[in-house]
Image: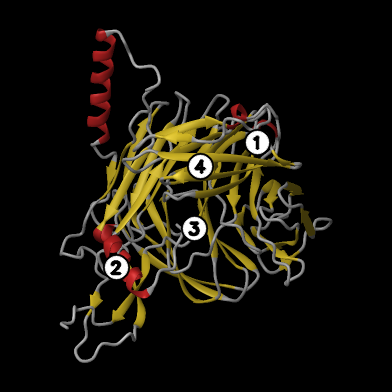
Amino acid sequence: MKSTHLSLIAGAAALAAITGFASLTAPQGPATTEAKAAASLPVERSSLVCPAPSTSDLAETRYTSFTPPGKDAGKGAEGEKGTAELKPALPVLDEDEPETDPEKAEKAEEAAKKAREKADKPVLAVKEPGKPVTAEADGSAAPALVGTATGTLAPGWAAQQTTTVTAGGARGLLGVSCTAPDTDFWFPGVSTARSRQDYVHLTNPDDSAAVADIELFGPKGPVTSEVGDGITVPGRSSVALLLSTLTDEAVNDLTAHITTRSGRIGAVVLTADDGSGTDWLTAAADPAGTLIMPGIPADATSVQLVAYAPGESDADVKVQLMGKNTTFAPAGNDTLHIKSGMTATVDLKDITRGEPGSLRLTPVEKSRATPIVAALRVVRGTGEKQEYAYIPATGPVGARSTVTDNRAKGSTLSLAAPGADAEVKVTTSAGSEGGEAAVETYKVKAGTTMAVTPKPPAGLKGTYALTVETVSGGPVHASRSLVLPEDGVQMFTVQTLPDDGGTVLVPSAQQDLSVLDD
């Protein structure tokens, strides 16, 4: 989520309203404007949204949710641990054509009433920090979810939906971490080509409507669209739009930019490629001069880089793979020129050569660090046995990050240290139905990627969560790959692990704000 710099007093007041932690103090003695250093305190409220899982009647979806334990687990700001619940989004009603038939209108109102009642019942709710919870849904009727966590269940609250479709055009493993609502999203790698079915899902967690705009940029610049502006997302609802209906141009590699005029939303893109599989594409990290895409599988048969330069200047970047032991440039693709306002792509083929890796993009000239956005489309297998997933550029783990829905087999954690040596702590939680949490530490050499197979919790029953914390050294970028083989297809999905934003810096003021008598 974006942050805004506030003045000392206004900042403390605003954060007090948001977190319930910040306070203004009136010290004894003469008035002073001297301020104490800002304190890092846990957030008291966080929001997540999850898109509708699938349009396939064969879909099997598992929801998972988890809050990592903190220093004061079980004690809220007022002695209560709070709540963390995900509930169904409300259906979008067609208000442009109101029903005139009294009998049909009555039935419609009754259906809407039932939908509201259903939306008040949580699909899953975390009861205590440190223990995952799960729920399941089958078929195409599973709704989008919206939710809020409060108290000590808010810091680091994470959720995921994992969907398996074993047959048909939407065959594949689709995984997506439920996202925090925001106002600005970049999606390099979308398409309006005839072989693709890319749906952008916009989910509004708030009671009032949000209004969003979608812009598309191809290899030749902006793509003409007359219907991508002013998209209304009703309160507590979700809408899905097929990208190819926004334009008459069929373009294979595009960058989508989604912004809101009012309100906030969660945005993700569901992609499906005829004969290749399907998966979710989550938003890439904000434009920056240096980008990291962690966790390319060792057995990747094809890797495609999609990048876009949103500013007024072209970008020239070095393309490097951080491998198991060192960093190197792929032969013939050591640099990439990205024209301003245009999407560039490059086929890196089987760049990993049998070893896990992460892609790093840095400016050719340090003095010209033109901001860009980027993502990878990674393929495993060939022919009818292939499957793909996306790895968008992501921020570092920072203080802490969590990914849920890890199984007894199939999870791989990738840790990349682009700058300096680093040490991280990895906690495997207790299982959703039983098992004991465990902790391991890993040292990651600068310029390399470490692929770790997590040791499941002892006595594991159900699924577990992985929490990564930076202990020392430089920044670490991470992702989790989940593999669930089906009929010889290595179906997989990749989720990145940016900082969970579980803490906020709260300034502490030392100014007497009392009203003085004349």
In primary-sequence order, the first of circles 1 and 3 is 1
Q: Residue, x 70% and y 33% (percent of image)?
A: 383
Residue wearing tag 4:
268
Kind of residue at badge 2:
Ala
In primary-sequence order, the first of circles 2 and 4 is 2
> Mark number for residue 497?
3
Residue projecting furthest to the right: 332
Labels 2 & 1 near each other (Cβ < 8 A): no
Kind of residue at badge 1:
Ser
SS for callout 4:
strand
Residue wearing tag 2:
13
Taking depth in this image into account, of 227 and 354 the one nearest to the observer is: 227
Which quadrant of the rendered structure holds the C terminus? Answer: bottom left
The percent coordinates of residue 102 (x first, y second) are 25, 9
How far apart are the alpha carbons under marks 2 and 4? 33 Å
> Mark number for residue 329?
none
Residue wearing tag 1:
191
Within 10 Å of the Cα at label 1, are there few (<14), some (14-19), or many (20+) other Cα atoms? many
Residue 491 visible? The answer is no
How far apart are the alpha carbons under marks 2 and 1? 44 Å
How far apart are the alpha carbons under marks 3 and 2? 31 Å
How far apart are the alpha carbons under marks 4 and 3? 16 Å
How far apart are the alpha carbons under marks 1 and 3? 25 Å
Q: Residue, x 35% and y 37% (percent of image)?
A: 235
The percent coordinates of residue 108 (x first, y second) are 28, 17
